[in-house]
Image (spheres, grey):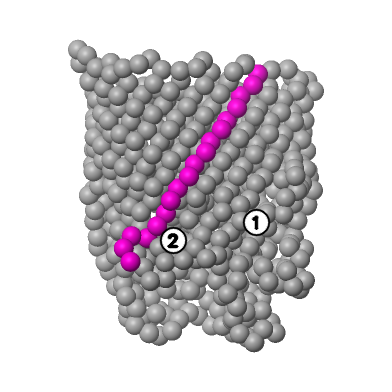
Amino acid sequence: MTRILVDGSRTNQLGVADAASAGTVTQEELAKRTVYRPGEMLEAVPGLVVSQHSGEGKANQFYLRGFNLDHGTDLRTTVDDMPVNQRSHAHGQGWTDLNFLIPELAVRLDYKKGPYSAEEGDFASAGTASVAYANRLLQGIASVSGGQHGYGRALLADSVDAANGSLLYAIEAMHNDGPFTHPDDYQKLNAVLRYSQGYANNGFNVSLMAYKADWNSTDQIPLRAVQGGQIGRNDAIDSTDGGKSHRYSLSGGWRRTDDDSASKVNAYIIANQLDLWSNFTYFMDDPVHGDQFAQPDKRVTSGVNASHSWHQHTENGSSNTTIGVQLQNDNIYNALLNTEARRTLSVTRQDHIVESSAGLYIENSTRWNAAWRTTVGARVDAYRFNVQSDLAANSGTVNDHLVSPSASVVYGPWQTAELYANFGTGFHSNDARGTTLTIDPKTGLAADKVQPLVRSRGIEFGARTAWLPGLQTSLSLYRLDFDSELTYAGDAGTTEAGPPSRRYGVEFSNYYKPLKWLSVDLDLAYARARSRGYVEEGSYIPGAIEGTGQLAVTVDDGGPWSGSLKLRYFGPRPLIEDNSVRSNASMTLNGRIGWKMRKDLSLELEAFNITNRRDSAIDYYYASQLKGEAAPVDDIHFHPIESRSLRATLIKTF
């Protein structure tokens, strides 16, 4: 990915943040990161791992705080205040496709962890990641990239004065095959057009975004087939897997700020469509045609967020009270189909879903004196799920609501340190189809409905310090409970209810800039995830992340040369409830060298998986059946990390 460098550094959160695990990553830091795919930009959030088990056009896999977040459940992600998570999605609840993201336009990444903010609602229990786009660019940019495995990318972006405001435009084209025997042939076109007036806190913007892509998929493959020599690490079992998608959006935001108050409103309408073909079990269910299935999903998402804040100054401190409302509606058509080579054989289910929600919150932040400050809030969420299924018994309307209080206490009488205590409740919604389900559409047997909204409860204690000049350190200890890890199993067309869960964890994050030209990031995290109560098959949660680590070193003295290295450790995980099968750890080393040939022209060289490790990007354990096998076999199924590759980018600014 190419970059625009601007002045700035990691934002010091002393005196600002309500938790040790909250923070802001600036444009300068985002620009220095070496990322293989757009979604990896979120790895700037300490402890967050972004992976992939399929073709490049598919939503990424996310891991954070003891969660395998699948494609986004329990990680609330927004871009310019538009939700990225897709509710009641055909392939997985909270589907988070960030392939439309253009990193060069990102000016800030704000993150929070845990259910401690009244402003955050659905999917926010593990954390939130909010990307903000620029209203204006300091300079235009034209870049062209080329690399191994059929990689190519071109970008043109600039902003010009127009009608008392600024008009920003960006257009991106990309292609990538990856190292796979059957090339991904990932092709995408991406564009942004934004008009704005005023400034970030006093002004408005209106934006159009358009993204379109199609690809082939090399999904996870069975370990036994590789060890037996039937296929190679980069081969596919079903070469017809793949997908195509588009995302078109119209959005606008307005903000007004003065000494005593602040108001903001944003509205959006998003048209998403995905056609996805997958085959994870090969010939287990259908020995003749194979087990490929399709999950088409077409939706229009619309919403409005509005808030108003009052500022008050007291003799010893200050107080800020905010009220807000969040409205969202999803009009969805999705299905689960049995297919062969992307040709439909039969229909498992087809549904029309209208899912509507309203959230109202109030939050007060008060600085009582030089040492103490508090934040107390609550939100109430009301949901309506309406499902019209091709099977009448699975149709219906369900309503649910939750009240979620939260509180934070910060103690910081020192100039260079603060202590934090956080308490809160949150939730995630479940797939609408599970709330009205009475008959399993695949087996025809009776099935149980699920709770529409599932409660989470979190506690966190932390500390932050900047005792050494140039060093920012934070430490947090947390516990997070869920009443039930309920998820819709889109691959099977059913809803599965898991037992209650509990996670304990510790995170240690450091940013050190000992010299003007040198910065070092070191982030370490460990989590323990277990089911609560007696579970016959075992209390481990398959895929739950345990240990992660990241070490990044960046060198940039403002001269013609710059560079960075990033080492990422992704620890082993239980793959089955009794912990008898575990994944191996993986480790990747990426790097970048930049050469500024002249003021307006530079060249960047990026290297991925420099040590060419043969690790897994992701591992699963389940039963599958290959052609010629007499019965299903329980096995590890893995997706390899991409082999070593190089990319070069020529950047012209104007």
Residue for point 29% across, 65% down: 451
Q: Are marks 1 and 2 in contact (CB under 8 Å)?
A: no
Q: Earlier in the sequence, mark 1 or mark 2?
A: 2
Q: Which quadrant holds residue 261?
A: top left
Q: Tell me the quadrant of the picture where the N terminus can be found.
A: top right
Say which residue label 2 marks: 540
- The x and y percentages for residue 440 are 39, 80
Q: Report the span colored magenta.
A: 517-534
Viewer-nearest residue: 73 or 390: 73
Residue sitting at x 56%, y 61%: 582
The number of discs equals 2
As for residue 529 lying within the magenta part, the answer is yes
Q: Is 81 placed left or right of 287 in the picture?
A: left
> Label 1: few (<14), some or many (≥20) within 10 Å?
many
Residue 592 shows in the view: yes
94 left or right of 573?
left
Residue type at mark 1? Ser
**Where in the figure is residue 524, as x and y percent of width and height?**
52, 38
At mark 1, the secondary structure is strand
How busy is the neighbourhood of tag 2: few (under 14 within 10 Å), some, or many (20 plus)? many
Q: Residue at x 64, y 87 (%)?
A: 630
Comparing 467 with 439, the one in front is 467
Instruction: Indicate whether 596 appears above or below 82.
Output: above
- Residue at position x 44%, y 60% from top? 541
